[in-house]
Amino acid sequence: MAMNENSRTLLVFIIIIALATILIRVKNSGTYRTVLSMEITKDEIMEHIRYLSHKDRAGRYPGSRESKDVISYLIRNLKSYGVKPGMENKSYVQPFDFTDNINLGKNNNMVIDGDTLELESDFIPLWFSGNDSISTSAVFAGYGFNINSDEIKWNDYANIDVSGKWVFIMRNSPDRDMQHSLYRPYAGLHKKMLVARDNGAAGVVFISQIEDTGLFPLKYISGYKNGGIPAIHLANKAADKLLKKNGWSRKKIQNTMNESLQSITFEMPNIIIAANVELEPAEIRGGNVVGLIKSGNRRYRDEYIVLGAHFDHIGMGGPGSGSRKPNATEIHYGADDNASGTAGILELAQKLISHKSRLKRSILLVGFDAEEKGLLGAKHFVENPPVALDKIAAMINLDMIGRMKDSTFNIGGVGTSSIFQPLLDSLTSNSDYNVNMTMPGFGPSDHAAFYAEDIPVLFFFSGVHSEYHTPEDTWKLINLEGEKYILEKVHDVVFHLANIPAKPDFKESGPREGEMTRNASFKVTFGIMPAYGSIEEGLEVDGISKIDGPAAKAGIKKGDVIKMINGKPIKDIYEFMDRLRELEKGMTVPVIIERNGKKQELSVSF
C-alpha cells in the first residue's frame, strides 16, 4: 500500500523515538556501547572502567549490594558477546562464603570482686579470644613474657602458678617506642595469650601502660580461629581500682619493670573474676564470575587457558581496610586496581569469541572476587575448579594494567614455563613499548593461587603509583593507550597458548609462599604453603614450597593439618608463626599432623 509524505514522516519519527528509547534503556542497564566493536578499543575500555569505578559502585566491597551490581554487569556483558556460563550448573557465578567480621554475642559480661563492669566501656573481648565462661582467682604476671634467647632472659611465669586462673598482663614491653626492640617478637597480645595458655591459664586480661588510653576496638583479623582461652582488655579505670586493692598502680608496675628489666608478679588473694565471652563470626557471600569460550576442536577443547582479573576493591576504606589513607573513610574507586583489569577481561572476551573457530583450546574468563581479602576468590576457584586443574594449560592474570608510565609495563611469572620468555620476546620485539620481565611465579595477586598448583602463570601489571589504595585512584588517571597495548599483547599470548600443540611445561620459579618466609624474626622455615583461608583448626598445608625442605623430608603433604609443634598446640596460622619463632637451626621436634581424619606424629629437622 502506498504511503503519503505525512505518513512516511510520521513512521520515521516513530522509528527514531523507538531506537532512542532502546538506547537509553540499554545505556541505563550498564551494557551500552558507543561503538560496538569486536576489536579492543579505548572507548570501550573507558566505558567499562567508568562503570566499575563509578561512585555508585561504592568501591566494590565484596558481598555488598554494589559488588552484586558488578557481578550482574559482568554477566550481562559476557552474555551479550555470546560467552557461555563457565560453571557445571550452567551458571556464570561461583559463590563462596567467608568470614568478614566478628560481632559481640548476647552473653558478654564481667564481674570483678562483686563489681559488674560495662561492656565496651569497662572491658572488651579481643579479636582472638576464645568463647568461654570462667569464674576463678587471678594472678598478675608482669609483661607475660617467657623469653630465653641469646639477648634476653625473662620469664614472668618462673615463680607463680597460673594453672586454672585468670592472668593479668601489662601490654607492650619495656621499650615500646623502639622500632627495633628486641622485645618486639614477644610483645604482641596474641603471643602473650599463647604463652599464658601454655602455662595453664584459664583466661587472660590485658591492662594498659600509662601512655595508653581507651579500649581496643573489636576488629576482625583474618586467620584467627578464636579458639584460644578468653582474652579481655580491661579499661584503665577498672584496672587501677583492682591494682590499688593489691597495693600497686600501673605507673609503679611499669616504671619498676622498665628500670630493673625484671619481672613483677603477685597473687590477687580473695578476688574472684567472673567473665563470659561470646564472639560471633559474621559470614558474607562473595562470588567469582566464570565465562566459557568453548573450542570446537575435539582434540584440544577440554584443555583451558584461564584469563582472570579481580573485580573487588576496598569499599569505603577506613582502618584495617588496606587503605593507604586509613583515616579517609570515603569511596576508594579502584579504577586501576582493578577496574582496569576487569575491563580488560571483557574486551578480551569480546575479541577472542570473534575468532572462536580459530581457537584449539577453550578459554575460561574469570572475574575473581575478594582478592583484597587474601586472594579468596582465586583460592576458592582452584579448590573447587569447574574443570580439572591438570586441564588448565596456563593462567593469565591482569591486575592494575591502567597506569603505564614511560611506555613500560611488567610481566611476572615468566620463569614458570620454559616457553614463556621466548614467546614474550617475539611478541614484544620491534615495539615502542618496553617490558620488564620477572621470573618468580609467586606474587601479591590471584595468579599465586594457580602457581601453588603447578600451573604456569603470567601476571600483567603496569606498575605501582601513589594513588594505589587511596580515594585518588580514579578513571581520570587511566592511560588508555597503554592499557590498549597491554591487552593486545595479552590477546596475542592467549591466542598463541590456545593453539600450540603441547601445553606449556611447568617450572618452579621462586618460592611459593609469602610473608612468613620474609619475616626476619623466623630463624627456620618449614618449607610449606599455608592454606590462609582454611576453616580447619590448626594449620592446613596448601602445598610444599621446598621439595627438599624440612616438611617435605619429614613426610608432610598437601592437605595435612598441623595440630602441634614440639608439644605445643596449634589452632591457626598465627599460632603456627608464634611456634615457628621459637625454633632454631639444628633442632629436631615432634610435629602432630592430621591426615584423612587420623592423627600421626612426624619428626621434623631444621
Image: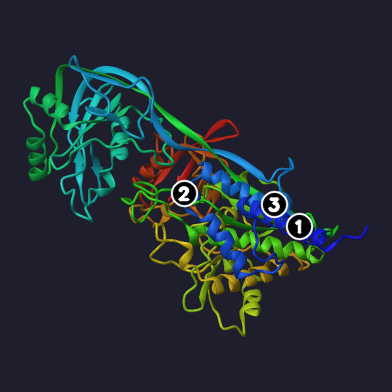
Instruction: Give the image location of residue 123, x and y in percent.
Output: 24, 28
The quarter of the rendered structure image containing the N terminus is bottom right
Q: Nearer the viewer, mark 1 or mark 3?
A: 1
Task: Answer above or below: position of 111 versus 197.
Answer: above
Q: Label 1 to label 2, Cα distance in Å?
A: 37 Å
Residue 222 left/right relative to 263: right
Q: Residues within 10 Å of mark 2 (few under 14, many from 20)?
A: many
**The one of 474 and 308 positioned closer to us in this rendering:** 474
Q: Which residue is mark 3?
A: 291
Which circle marks residue 138 in the picture?
Answer: none
Instruction: Give the image location of residue 191, x and y in percent.
Output: 31, 40
Q: Does residue 163 appear in this view?
A: yes
Residue positioned 44% across, 50% down in the render? 314
Q: Considering only order in the chain, which callout, 3 or 2, is on the residue closer to the N terminus?
A: 2
Label 3 residue SS: strand
**The one of 308 and 91 positioned closer to us in this rendering:** 91
